[in-house]
Image (tube, grey):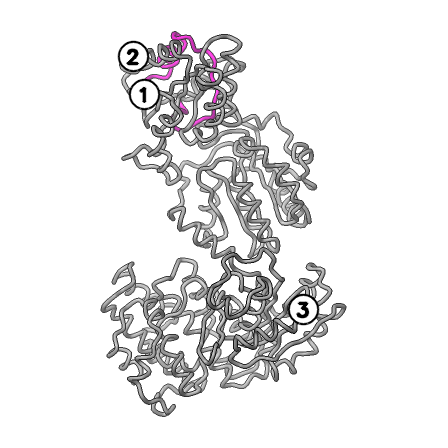
Amino acid sequence: MINVKDFYETLTKNGTDFFCGVPDSLLKDFCAYIADNVPGERHIISANEGNAIAMAAGHYLATEKPALVYMQNSGLGNCINPLLSLTDEEVYKIPLLMLIGWRGEPGVKDEPQHIKQGKVTDKILEAVSIDYDILPKDLPEAEKVIEKAFKFIKENKRPYALIIKKDTFEKYKSENIKDNRYKLKREDAIKIAAQSLEENDIIVSTTGQISRELYEYREEKKQLHNKDFLTVGSMGHASSVALAIAIEKQNRNVYCFDGDGAFIMHMGALPVISQTGLKNFKHIIFNNEAHDSVGGQPTSANQLDFKNLAKSCGYEKVFSAKSRKELKNALKKLKEAQCTALLEIKVKCGARKDLGRPKEKPQENKKAFMYFLEENIAFTDTGSLSKLKTILEQKKAKSVLVFTGKSSYEKIIRQIQKQLRGVKFQTYNNFSINPKAEEAQEALKKLKGFDVIVAVGGGSVLDFAKLFRYCYDNQITPQNALENKCQFSSAKKTPFIAIPTTAGTGAEATKFAVVYVNGKKYSFEHRDILPDYVILESSFLKGTPKYTKACCAADALCQAIESYWSVNSTKESKEYAKRAMELCRDYMEEFVTTDKAEPAQNMALAAFLSGRAINISKTTAAHALSYQITTDYSIPHGHAVSLSISKLMQINEEAKKVIDPRGENYVKETLKEIKEILKTGNPQKWFDNLFQSIGLEQDLKKLGIKNTDELAKSVNIQRLKNNPVELDFDTLKYILE
């Protein structure tokens, strides 16, 4: 390893006495040394690497001496332009020495954002015609390489690069790292900020320790990570990522958790953000005045007035805080601000040494986050119907289209109309219990001139409204929609509020709609058909016939179970499914047998959560087996699904012919977890008792179900592929006996 003092003296001996750049963890010991030993005007920590290249050019123009520019290899992207259009031999021909930390070096374990950069570092340098060497870790050998580099620079008047491997430099502890005097720890500030957010709020966090601390907070609280986009790499760009999300998700608040170094690196984003005038973009800067994760080198934040800077760039509201009390007050104001707003939190420098790193890969975080973005805003508390009026006021609705059931709507019409007071509205229910594509086409011809769509009813009503909204917004026929002939969805989306009157299908939470074409059942799937808002009003379930409630509840339970064991299950879908199963376990029987409000509200929530679960994972064999039973024997869907769930539990638990790529042990553990959630060691007996108590006959012969061969042949093969174990024809017959 090389002593940093010796390295510095070798550089100065060769004529370099000006240093600039962006600190890197592999260079932090050298950067710390020059920070301690080089006068401030001769060592500049730049906003970004491109700035440093430009300063090196200016230094050469004024002195004819080459400067040293230090950076992490990820910073090469920031300096390509000045390297090619300023320093290149075909332009101004300006010499300089680049010191590049080699993160992601092939064969050396590193964080995911560095892997690709590490593989192509040398190729990037070659592509822009910059000669380079890998600096040896032995000083005598390193001196030879440095002398070679300076000889090249002087003779050719061109940049030259030295690539620095991990553990090239000996440790050096700076004598001049200053305490910024702030008392509030950044990790504590992140916890307070995250705790203050609403259920549907979105976070985009910048690279480095802010994302790591946010991740640790979720782990500590045993929360999912799907609400957070943990930006890795791309320093300074988190706010632009958040901006584009905020543009597309204007019914949800988007918070950017930024750092002062990242903020400064690409400050040009500020006026771009402010000019959008978005009400839902919330910018939070955790300012510790340091590049904390790469050695604590200072940023220029101690010289910046973030509040005035943001104001001058067009932010309408700006706030600051440096204590817990101030932070809580500022967060309240930030949440209430109906404009582009910024909050600067002044925090103590440093992080705990045992700070963990995300366990999931970036692609896994992306997938879970995108599912979360896809989800709608749900109001699940008792009395949520009042939110309908609030949403209509927020949307400044003047005319509302209301899709309803036929008989069911009569019971609740007054409650709905009360919420619609002050706006024009028309109701529409001219479609079947099993909605047809041609009925949707007829509705598209008749219905025009509305600002908001409201769907009040069971799964069929919601599915019809879903298909209608998609076709209306995209000016496409239902037939073409079902055939996926809409290549690009319209940016225009008519606000859509779903108010389910049953507790079973979870249609309010899914991107699926069931529709019939010439008697054939289609399941239309598209992310844009999901309602924007869901209102769960348990009072609408009162008076529902016992058998109807039993069928709906069974559907919710089976969806949750199937989602949990599906080959497509994720951490997020399993959490939704678990919560749904727990609610079904505790409230299902009471919901079916009484008209009490609490069980009704909880089963409405269970159905909604099971919908969210299958929205990710899709259903499996129980649903695949149910469809033909419903078609041939007119047995309601939820009842039909319940007929196979017990035997499927048994078959999946045996884990023979496992097709889930996660393997036999995973499947067995999953089935064990389901039993634990249901609090039973004997699932078959548990199901028998439950279905008997709510009046769902389980004997197929008593239900008149025959021709099991034909039923087995009719099964949707794709749904069987979602099941964790392979189900052959004989097994399907056994299930249907």
- The answer to whether residue 659 of the structure is visible from this angle is yes
Image spot of residue 61 (x, y percent): 52, 11
Q: Position of residue 447 (x, y in %)?
A: 66, 71
Q: Which residue is mark 2?
A: 144
- Please, what is the three-letter code of the amino acid marked with disc 2? Lys
Estimate the spatial distance between the alpha carbons at disc 3 and disc 2, rounded to whole Å: 79 Å
Secondary-structure class at tag 2: helix
Count residues near mark 3 (Cα–Cα under 10 Å), then give few for <14, some for 14-19, many for 20+: few
On the rendered structure, is 378 left or right of 314?
left
Does the rendering let one see residue 459?
A: no
- Marks 3 and 2: which is nearer the front? 3
Q: CA distance from mark 1 to mark 3?
A: 69 Å
Q: Nearer the viewer, residue 526 or 176?
A: 526
| Precedes in sequence: disc 1 or disc 3 | 1
The amino acid sitting under disc 1 is: Asp
Q: Residue at x 59, y 36 (%)?
A: 269
Q: What residue is shown with label 3?
A: 448
Where does the magenta region start and end? 2-29
Camera-side residue: 172 or 476?
Answer: 476
The reply to whether callout 3 and callout 2 are in contact (CB within 8 Å) is no
Label 2 crowd (10 A; few <14 / some 14-19 / many >=20): few
- Above/below status of 303 relative to 713: above
Q: Is residue 504 magenta?
A: no
Say whether disc 1 or disc 2 marks the residue closer to the N-terminus. 1
* Image coords of residue 182 (percent x, y): 57, 32
Residue under label 1, please give it.
133
Q: Nearer the viewer, mark 1 or mark 3?
A: 3
Classed neighbour count for the residue bearing mark 1: other residues with Cα under 10 Å, few (<14), some (14–19), many (≥20): some
Quadrant, the C terminus: bottom left
Which amino acid, mark 3? Lys
